[in-house]
Image (cartoon, rainbow, N blue to C red):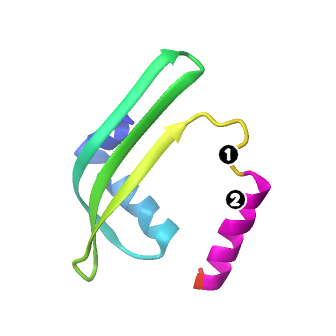
Amino acid sequence: MRLLRNKANFDILEGFLSELLHEDFKIKQILESEGNKETEDDKFNRVDILVENKNGELVIVEIQNTREAAFLCPNRTRWLRNWFDSTGR
């Protein structure tokens, strides 16, 4: 997550968010971040980012980076697929 704290990399993250959410975003600031590393397999990082859309609305986006063996379980996958279908994305 060190990558996210560097303003030189904000363009990459803005592009990622814009493609993922089908809306243009501009990063305003990093609000909060945390991480832990008790063992090599137990790594967790989280960062909250304040972004602004083209309408001037401010949105807080939380990005998490963790190792998950089964992150997309069938129920979560089904929910995501239904959400994308219902929003036309």
Image quarter in which the N terminus is found: top left
Labels 2 & 1 near each other (Cβ < 8 A):
yes
In the rendered image, the residue lying farthest to the front is 75
- Look at the picture and state if 58 lies above or below 9: below
Residue closer to the observer: 12 or 22: 22
Secondary element at tag 1: loop
**What residue is at 24 percent from the left and 48 percent from the top?**
30
SS majority, magenta? helix
In the rendered image, the residue lying farthest to the top is 39
- In which quarter of the view is residue 27 placed? bottom left
- In which quarter of the view is residue 86 placed? bottom right
Answer left or right for 46 relative to 32. right
Binning the other alpha carbons within 10 Å of mark 1 as few (below 14), some (14 to 19) or many (20 upward) gives few
**What residue is at 42 percent from the left and 68 percent from the top?**
18
**What residue is at 73 percent from the left and 42 percent from the top?**
70
Q: Is residue 79 magenta?
A: yes
The residue where tag 2 is placed is: 76
Q: Which numbered circle lies on residue 71?
A: 1
Image quarter in which the C terminus is found: bottom right
Give the x, y percent position of residue 59. 30, 67
Quote the CA–CA distance across marks 2 and 1: 9 Å
N-terminal of the pair, mark 2 or mark 1, is 1
Q: How many marks?
A: 2
| Amino acid type of the residue that numbered disc 1 sits on in the rendered structure | Phe
**Magenta-highlighted residues:** 73-86
Q: Is residue 54 magenta?
A: no
